[in-house]
């Protein structure tokens, strides 16, 4: 399997530290508001990654944090704590807000068939871990105290920027134009590990620490939570592209300075979902949530399908028209699967492995989910029996998670019920009261032919009856007949 590593800017062969267990970490949501469907694009792609690793035979332990403290309005430690902002907006406590939006996030994930990671850890659960790392950083002089806060000293690193090619001179002390800079920082890229005295006096959640009562910075939580559950070596760390800088850059800085060795092997970043008017946002314009899609009559899985049809390293434009197209294609896909007959034939092992290989080749190539979807259509087109096709679809869907077989079953059932209801409501009346099973069967056959749009056959039956001296008159939901 090859994946694009944002840290090396190259596609690399995926070789986990421990061949028996892939350790994967995902940055979780900041639970101050509903997730928008852009956020969920990232989680869908991370879900695909985890499921494909399992499909390819790996054991995976996946950890995700829930940011319920410390994430300020700007990722660069400026502004207000987002959680506090949410609590004020809704006149609730920070913990109430956190619980409400955490539950809402997982409800959305369920609708999108996003599996809950093995470990989900709220940031407020791991204060001891952060204190331990910050202590270590202070001891090694990678951190300093200023104005009551503890800061990471980015100038102590040989290389700070990992994901982008900024000039190292940018590390020099200085104030960026137009941005209110924290005057306690020695270097522009220093960041807060622990806040005590600060401008955020109404901070709701505070803990005791060796540096005074306060709360952790945002970046330290992912290092602390990851090390708590996955140890000192991480295989894959993922998040949306906006997390690359400064969040992931700072995670690497503090983790490697603390551990004294390389921390994470592969970094994967999902490009953004944008609208025609630009960046998707929780505050600007239409707030696109899963509930809104449902209100407008879309199946959340049609949105998942929409995401899968593009590559995660390309930004994706959302529009209602694009979603309409995805919903139509998804419905057609389900109908085509519903036309396959379960239990027909036995699996053709050779064809099965050839077609599965196509799917794996697509996913092995940096998770090319759009080619994986093409491999699914190839199954439908293949010259093989329905048993083989259905087994392949079941297998691919352990990764794609589009509920393909369940929806096709439901569609088949609905079609059966509809046919039965129409048949039941179709009445055949003899005008003279004569009962004749043969004539009744012929009139029913004519009706079935009409339903199947086989009008030639329907006309043939009518002519046949006419030749026998039987005249049929169509009435609403039925037909009358008489001898002439
Ligand atoms: P947040 O709740 O803001 O911490 O973000 C949760 C996740 O969504 C992070 O991995 C972000 O990088 C990601 N994200 C934010 N905006 C978008 C977007 N428009 N498209 C895709 N992912 C996004
Ligand atoms: Zn993170």
Image: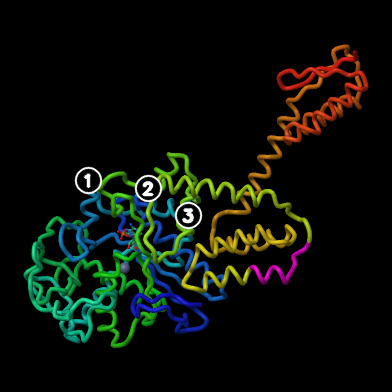
Q: Secondary structure at mark 2?
A: loop
- Look at the image and tell me whether residue 172 can be seen: yes
SS at badge 1: helix
Q: Within 10 Å of the Cα at label 3, are there few (<14), some (14-19), or many (20+) other Cα atoms?
A: many
Mark 2 to mark 1 CA distance (whole Å): 18 Å
Of the residues under marks 2 and 1, which one precedes in the sequence? Answer: 1
**Badge 2 local density, few (<14 within 10 Å), some, or many (20+)?**
some
Q: Which residues are magenta?
A: 346-355
Quarter containing the C terminus: top right
Does the rendering let one see residue 126? no
Q: CA distance from mark 2 to mark 3?
A: 13 Å
Residue at screen point 60% across, 61% down? 376
Q: Return the residue nearer the eye: 190 or 393.
A: 393
Which callout, 2 or 3, points to the residue nearer the camera?
Answer: 3
Label whose residue precedes the other's in the sequence (1 or 3) = 1
Residue, disc 2: 289
* Picture residue at 71% right of the left edge, 39% below the top: 416
Foreground residue among 376 and 457: 457
- Ligand 2 is found in the corner quadrant, namely bottom left
Question: Where residue 159 sits in the image (x, y, percent)?
Answer: 23, 83
Numbered badge on residue 89: 1
Q: In the rendered view, would you say 300 is above or below 453?
A: below
Q: Quadrant of residue 260?
A: bottom left
């Amino acid at each position: 399997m090859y994946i694009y590593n944002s840290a090396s800017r190259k596609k690399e062969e995926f070789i986990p530290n421990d061949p028996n267990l892939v350790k994967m970490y995902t940055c979780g949501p900041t639970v101050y508001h509903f997730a928008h469907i852009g956020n969920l694009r990232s989680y869908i792609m991370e879900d695909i990654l985890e499921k494909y690793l399992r499909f390819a035979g790996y054991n995976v332990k996946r950890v995700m944090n829930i940011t319920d403290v410390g994430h300020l309005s700007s990722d660069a430690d400026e502004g207000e704590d987002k959680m506090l902002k949410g609590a004020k907006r809704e006149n609730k406590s920070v913990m109430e807000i956190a619980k409400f939006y955490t539950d809402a996030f997982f409800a959305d994930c369920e609708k999108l068939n996003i599996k809950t990671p093995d470990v989900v850890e709220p940031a407020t659960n791991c204060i001891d871990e952060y204190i331990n790392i910050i202590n270590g950083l202070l001891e090694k002089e990678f951190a300093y105290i200023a104005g009551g806060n503890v800061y990471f000293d980015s100038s102590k690193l040989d290389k700070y920027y990992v994901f982008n090619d900024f000039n190292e001179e940018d590390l020099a002390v200085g104030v960026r134009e137009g941005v209110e800079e924290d005057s306690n920082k020695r270097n522009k890229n220093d960041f807060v590990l622990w806040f005590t005295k600060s401008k955020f006096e109404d901070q709701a959640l505070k803990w005791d620490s060796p540096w005074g009562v306060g709360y952790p910075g945002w970046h330290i939580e992912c290092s602390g939570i990851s090390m708590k559950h996955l140890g000192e070596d991480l295989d894959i760390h993922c998040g949306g592209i906006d997390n690359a800088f400064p969040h992931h850059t700072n995670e690497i800085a503090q983790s490697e300075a603390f551990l004294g060795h390389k921390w994470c092997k592969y970094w994967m970043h999902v490009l953004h979902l944008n609208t025609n008017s630009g960046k998707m946002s929780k505050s600007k314009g239409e707030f696109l949530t899963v509930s809104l899609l449902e209100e407008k009559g879309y199946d959340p899985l049609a949105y998942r399908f929409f995401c899968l049809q593009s590559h995660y390293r390309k930004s994706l434009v959302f529009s209602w028209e694009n979603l309409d197209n995805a919903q139509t294609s998804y419905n057609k896909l389900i109908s085509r699967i519903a036309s396959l007959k379960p239990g027909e034939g036995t699996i053709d092992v050779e064809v099965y492995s050839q077609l599965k290989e196509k799917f794996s080749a697509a996913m092995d190539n940096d998770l090319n989910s759009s080619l994986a979807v093409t491999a699914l259509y190839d199954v439908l087109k293949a010259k093989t029996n329905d048993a083989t096709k259905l087994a392949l679809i079941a297998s691919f869907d352990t990764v794609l998670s589009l509920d393909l077989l369940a929806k096709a079953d439901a569609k088949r059932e609905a079609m059966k019920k509809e046919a039965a209801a129409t048949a039941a409501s179709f009445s055949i009346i003899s005008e003279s009261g004569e009962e004749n099973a043969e004539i009744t069967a012929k009139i029913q056959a004519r009706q079935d032919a009409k339903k199947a749009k086989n009008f030639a056959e329907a006309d043939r039956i009518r002519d046949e009856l006419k030749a026998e001296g039987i005249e049929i008159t169509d009435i609403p939901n039925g037909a009358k007949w008489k001898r002439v």
